[in-house]
Image (cartoon, coloured by chain):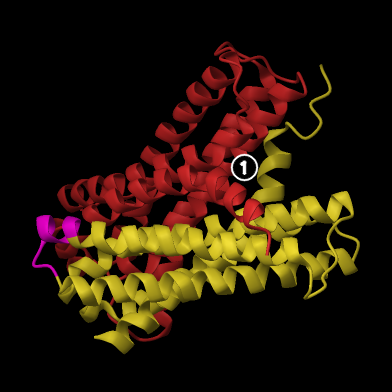
Chain colours: A red, B yellow
């Protein structure tokens, strides 16, 4: 077997995977905390929606980041934070996709538990939690990606190599933190 | 007005939202496993520490492996032959990456687990992390090869098809594999 090829693939990937591991460990620490476990007990359905909530973010914001990156390469957008119709459309679409699917996930989770005749939190609670956390996550990820992709492009780096790890790391860290913030806000308001 | 092409809000949402819906429904399967084992996870909070990495890392490994398959397919150097040495070198690299990352996860999750709750024994956590990680990496390899082969036979560009499929399928399997292994070990 080709040892040189094995070493090359390993070297090229281990850095990115380590960054992703750190983000995931932080998120895991939040999930395992006493406060978050209490939230899982208080709102049946929250654990059910967790994988969908964490996984869809990668798709929505990964696609947004990839679009920014190829738009820059093709000269369709400029790396500046001024009004541009294409850029504004892409930002709005990410908000619609990201917040829309979060609400759907909250409702789906409630529906699945209902259909199975299991105990579930109220629909308004689950949708409230996913709406608030989806909204906060969208703002941070869209702004974060704009700054980081434009910044790295201006520094002469290829954003294509950075979008994946940026999305995974920011997504893991802010996803669970905002999920907890949303639990607190919904607990106070409902 | 300028030609917006694929940069219209409506076009982006119409292309992506149906995919997100399908994905969310599939992810409910993964969530169902978590919810069904709620007692196990809430009684062993250290296991919850593993969950976000298990959700994301399978997809990362699958993406690395299938991006390489896809590039070699485009270059015309991929042969789907079991004697293909470069293919096996890539498999070995992915398995080594998984062994490194999930060994580190086993130890680090134990440290994190100590700070947030009563930890489970280091050996059990380490075995659960490494065994589920290697299983997940093996599944990622099989699924990547299968998805690349199917898109090659159908004349689809694997860059548009295999990588999203592989990433999401591996993400869904992460929690399932972790839950099966954890139930067997505990």
Q: Which residues are magenta?
A: B111-119
Q: Quadrant location of the N terminus of chain A?
A: bottom right
**Which residue is located at x 25 percent, y 61 percent?**
B107
Q: Secondary structure at mark 1?
A: helix
Near mark 1 (Cα within 10 A), the count class, few <14, some 14-19 or many ≥20, is some
Q: Main secondary structure of the magenta part?
A: helix
Give the residue number, with chain letter if any, for mark 1: A63
Q: Nearer the viewer, residue B114 or A122?
A: B114
Q: Nearer the viewer, residue A16 or A174?
A: A16
Q: Position of residue B57 (x, y in %)?
A: 47, 58
Q: Position of residue B116 (x, y in %)?
A: 12, 57
Asked whether residue A153 appears in the rendered view, the answer is: yes
Q: Position of residue B70 (x, y in %)?
A: 77, 55
Q: Quadrant of residue A69?
A: top right
Q: Is residue B30 left or right of residue A179?
A: right
Q: Is residue A122 left or right of residue A109?
A: left
Asked whether residue A105 appears in the rendered view, the answer is: no
Chain of the residue where label 1 is placed in the rendered structure: A
Q: Nearer the viewer, residue A121 or A178?
A: A178
Q: Quadrant of residue B5?
A: top right
Residue B177 is inside the magenta segment? no
Up the image or down, B107 lies above or below A133; here it is: below
């Amino acid at each position: 077997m080709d040892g040189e090829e094995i070493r090359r693939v390993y070297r090229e990937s281990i850095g990115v995977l380590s960054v992703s591991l750190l983000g995931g460990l932080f998120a895991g620490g939040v999930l395992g905390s006493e406060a978050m476990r209490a939230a899982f007990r208080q709102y049946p359905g929250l654990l059910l929606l967790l994988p969908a909530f964490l996984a869809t973010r990668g798709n929505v914001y990964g696609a947004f980041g990839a679009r920014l990156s190829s738009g820059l390469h093709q000269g369709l957008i400029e790396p500046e934070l001024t009004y541009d119709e294409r850029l504004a459309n892409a930002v709005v679409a990410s908000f619609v996709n990201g917040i829309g699917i979060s609400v759907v996930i909250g409702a789906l989770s409630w529906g699945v538990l209902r259909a199975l005749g299991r105990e579930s939190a109220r629909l308004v609670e689950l949708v409230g939690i996913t709406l608030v956390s989806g909204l906060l996550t969208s703002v941070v990820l869209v702004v974060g990606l704009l700054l980081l992709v434009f910044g790295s492009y201006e520094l002469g780096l290829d954003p294509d190599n950075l979008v994946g790890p940026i999305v995974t790391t920011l997504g893991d860290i802010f996803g669970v933190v905002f999920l907890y913030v949303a639990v607190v806000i919904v607990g106070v308001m409902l | 007005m300028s030609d917006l092409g694929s940069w219209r809000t409506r076009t982006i949402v119409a292309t992506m939202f149906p995919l997100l819906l399908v994905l969310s429904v599939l992810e409910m399967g993964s969530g169902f496993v978590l919810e069904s084992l709620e007692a196990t996870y809430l009684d062993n909070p250290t296991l919850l520490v593993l969950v976000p990495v298990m959700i994301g890392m399978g997809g990362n490994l699958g993406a690395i492996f299938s991006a390489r398959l896809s590039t070699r397919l485009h270059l015309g150097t991929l042969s789907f032959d079991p004697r293909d040495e470069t293919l096996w070198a890539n498999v070995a690299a992915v398995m080594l990456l998984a062994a490194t990352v999930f060994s580190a996860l086993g130890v680090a999750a134990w440290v994190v687990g100590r700070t947030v709750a009563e930890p489970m024994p280091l050996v059990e956590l380490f075995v659960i992390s490494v065994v589920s990680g290697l299983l997940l990496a093996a599944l990622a390899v099989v699924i990547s090869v299968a998805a690349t082969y199917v898109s090659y036979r159908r004349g689809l560009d694997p860059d548009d098809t295999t990588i999203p499929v592989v990433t999401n399928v591996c993400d869904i399997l992460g929690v399932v594999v972790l839950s099966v292994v954890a139930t067997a070990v505990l």
